[in-house]
Amino acid sequence: MNRIAVLILLSFITVSGIAQADGWSVFAKTKFDAKYNEKAAEYFLFPTFSTDLKTQVGKQFELEGYYLPIDVEGNAYIILSKFPYSQCFFCGGAGPESIAEVYFKEKTPSFEPDQFIRIKGKLKLNDSDLEHGNFILEEAVLVK
């Protein structure tokens, strides 16, 4: 009886680990609708986040991807992309669900363009501030 309980517990931990390991697939469940912004006088994609994603807000969330050399004023944060620069959201090759803003807990490390990294931080979602991305990791640390 104890052996079955341990196997069930291990399978739950494994399934949870897999879901957490691929945060991009959770982001991909986000629906985007084009809405007109009068202040900017153009259309923008606004997200509707999945229930699964909303339950992760404020929790530790892991992502691995490519560092994009986007010039951010003051180096306050970096952009992490599911895809390398040549295929990223800014180059027209992917959607907004494929990038995240990352704010490090301590000094922002230096990276090479397209360097593949793994980070962990607290998830924050943004559905209204056009100055920032939809997916934000705060208090992040470099895992590898």
Image (cartoon, rainbow, N blue to C red):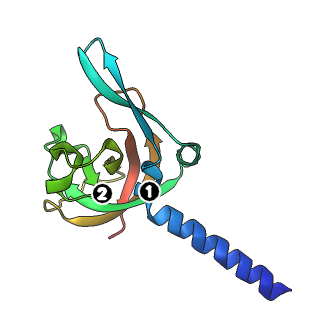
Q: What x and y, as percent, mark residue 94?
A: 26, 48
Query: Around disc 1, counting alpha carbons within 10 Å, would you say few (fewer than 14), some (14 to 19), or many (20 or more)?
Result: some
Q: Nearer the viewer, residue 86 or 137?
A: 86
Which is nearer the N-term, disc 2 or disc 1? Answer: 1
Determine the residue located farthest toward the right in the rendered image. Answer: 1
Q: Nearer the viewer, residue 25 or 75?
A: 25
Q: Is residue 114 above or below residue 128?
A: below
Q: Which mark is residue 116?
A: none
* Label 2, label 1: how far apart the Cα atoms are: 10 Å
Q: Is residue 123 above or below residue 8?
A: above
Q: Which residue is mark 2?
A: 82
Residue 90 horizontal side relative to residue 144, left or right: left
Q: What x and y, as percent, mark residue 104?
A: 33, 52
Residue 7 shows in the view: yes
x 86%, y 86%: residue:
1
Label 2 secondary element: loop
Q: What x and y, as percent, mark residue 85?
A: 16, 55
Label 1 secondary element: helix
Q: Which quadrant, please, contains the C terminus?
A: bottom left
Query: Around disc 2, counting alpha carbons within 10 Å, would you say few (fewer than 14), some (14 to 19), or many (20 or more)?
Result: many
x 38%, y 44%: residue:
136
Residue 107 shows in the view: no
Task: Say what amino acid the circle numbered 1 marks.
Answer: Ser
Q: Which residue is mark 1?
A: 25
Q: What x and y, as percent, mark residue 25?
A: 44, 56
Q: Is residue 75 above or below residue 14?
A: above
Q: Nearer the viewer, residue 40 or 74?
A: 40
